[in-house]
Image (spheres, rainbow, N blue to C red):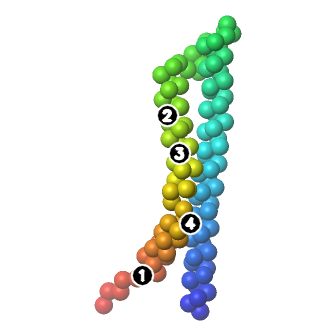
């Protein structure tokens, strides 16, 4: 009986971790799309004679682009490099420690 509950518990934790990774990746792809669109608008605004000085694009200047670029690079590093640094072994150790904490119950007598 215990092995079934342990397997289902591990399976639930694995599903939870996988869903968190998928949501993080989805968020990163949305950020990439918005960043690319903003960079295209910024380049068009700065280097062409197009009249792009309406409300949201009017505030897209060099400082905003530099800050947004730094945030985007940080997000990319967090997304892809952390998977390399914290590989499968780290994930398995972390999963085991989470399961041990969950299974460990403190009895008050």
Disc assigned to residue 70: 2
Quadrant the C terminus occupies: bottom left
Label 4 with label 2: CB-CB less than 8 Å = no
x, y percent for residue 50: 69, 10
Q: Nearer the viewer, residue 85 or 103?
A: 85
Check disc 4 and report its element: helix, strand or loop.
helix
x, y percent for residue 61: 53, 18
Q: Which residue is mark 3?
A: 77
Label 2 with label 1: CB-CB less than 8 Å = no
C-alpha span from label 2 to label 3: 11 Å
Q: Which residue is mark 4?
A: 88
Query: Which image quadrant for residue 84?
Result: bottom right
Q: Nearer the viewer, residue 46 or 20?
A: 46
Query: Which image quadrant for residue 43?
Result: top right
- Taking the view exactly as shown, the residue that stands out farthest to the front is 84
Q: Nearer the viewer, residue 15 or 65?
A: 65
* Earlier sequence position, callout 3 versus callout 4: 3
* Earlier sequence position, callout 4 versus callout 2: 2
x, y percent for residue 78: 52, 48
Disc assigned to residue 13: none
* Earlier sequence position, callout 2 versus callout 3: 2
C-alpha span from label 3 to label 1: 35 Å
Q: Would you place residue 96 above or below residue 108 in this image?
A: above
Closer mark to the observer between disc 2 and disc 1: 2
C-alpha span from label 4 to label 2: 28 Å
Q: Which residue is mark 1?
A: 104
Query: Which image quadrant for residue 33?
Result: top right
Check disc 3 and report its element: helix, strand or loop.
helix
Q: Residue at x 65, y 31 (%)?
A: 36
* Earlier sequence position, callout 3 versus callout 1: 3
């Amino acid at each position: 009986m215990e092995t079934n509950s342990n397997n289902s518990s591990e399976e639930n934790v694995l599903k939870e971790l996988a869903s968190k990774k998928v949501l993080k990746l989805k968020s990163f792809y949305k950020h990439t799309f918005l960043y690319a669109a903003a960079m295209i608008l910024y380049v068009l605004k700065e280097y062409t004679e197009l009249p792009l000085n309406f409300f949201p694009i009017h505030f897209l200047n060099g400082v905003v682009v530099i800050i947004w670029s730094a945030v985007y690079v940080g997000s990319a590093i967090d997304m892809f490099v952390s998977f390399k640094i914290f590989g499968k072994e780290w994930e398995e150790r972390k999963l085991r420690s989470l399961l041990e904490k969950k299974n460990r119950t403190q009895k008050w007598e």
